[in-house]
Amino acid sequence: MPLLTTATADHVTILTLSRPDTMNPLGASGDGDAFAAACDAINADMDVRCVILTGAGRAFSAGGDIKAMKEKSGNFGGTAPEIADGYRNNIHKILRALYSLRVPLIAAVNGPAIGLGCDLACLADMRVAGERAKFGVTFLKLGIIPGDGGTWILPRIIGEARAAELFYTGDVIDAETALDWGLVSRVVEQDALMDEARELAAKVAAMPPHALRQAKNLMRQGRSVSYDAALEMAANAQALMHSTQDHMEGVAALLEKRAPKFTGT
């Protein structure tokens, strides 16, 4: 079954993990290509200003396909070098595609986000959780390690000590604990989750698209460059933004005490 369904309206694209009968497992043949194609299309479309990622059914994603692991099939079969290539050419493609999105990404976590599913949610810029959401990086309980870069992703969000606690114990935390730890920014009633995510996305989508993408890029680059380099990047990006019609619209709207209407020009 195809992994992703895509719907776009009002400058927002919703990506839905669509294997609800099996809790939206990841890593089947073609999953990486599906994510890469969807994210490439979003990056190329200046009409898209925000993305929501969620799961169909009762789970966000249970992570890697346990049945395939047991059967040593698909991404988890073959020799050690073949399995490594499977990660590089499929699972890592999923993660690289999401990480490379140029527009803000919201994860609407509707249920369990476990293992690879948790790390997928953590690649979002913002995470909103329903009351039934749960989070865990339970790789060690299966005798494996986070093969998806999770040891790089999670500590950047909740800090080294709490990430270590989750990795080394395999514990699963509930939505309220995730909120307390800063893993999500808000927890909402289950039935209100997508409305909340859409409302947040609408606020993001109201921003000028070029400046929005530049702001996300600067935040990403700021993780690994010096302050002087960040200042230089900001100066160059800001000069470009000052030349846009959206900048002039923003100034005019503020002076005229009205909401701006940004067009991407």
Image: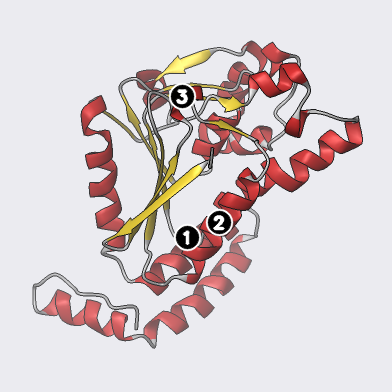
Q: Inspect the image, locate mark 2, and give the three-letter code of the amino acid beneath it.
A: Arg
Q: Is residue 147 left or right of residue 170?
A: right
Q: Inspect the image, locate mark 1, and give the three-letter code of the amino acid beneath it.
A: Lys
- Whole-percent x, y for residue 78 in the image: 87, 30
Q: N-terminal of the two: label 3 or label 2?
A: 3
Circle 3 packing at 10 Å, graded few (<14), some (14-19), many (20+), is: few
**The residue tagged with tag 2: helix, strand or loop?**
helix
185 vs 118, nearest the viewer: 118
Name of the residue lying farthest toward the left: 257
Observer able to see residue 223:
no
Q: Is residue 225 left or right of residue 43?
A: right
Residue found 75% across the figure and 19% down from its top: 71
- Whole-percent x, y for residue 58 in the image: 38, 23
Residue found 30% across the figure and 66% down from its top: 207
Q: Which residue is mark 3?
A: 21
Residue 216's disc is: 1
Instruction: Tell me how far mark 1 sits from mark 3, CA to CA.
Output: 35 Å
Q: Which residue is mark 2?
A: 220
Q: Inspect the image, locate mark 3, and give the three-letter code of the amino acid beneath it.
A: Asp
Instruction: Tell me how far mark 2 sits from mark 1, CA to CA.
Output: 6 Å
Instruction: Name the quarter where the N terminus is drawn.
Output: top right
Observer able to see residue 241:
yes
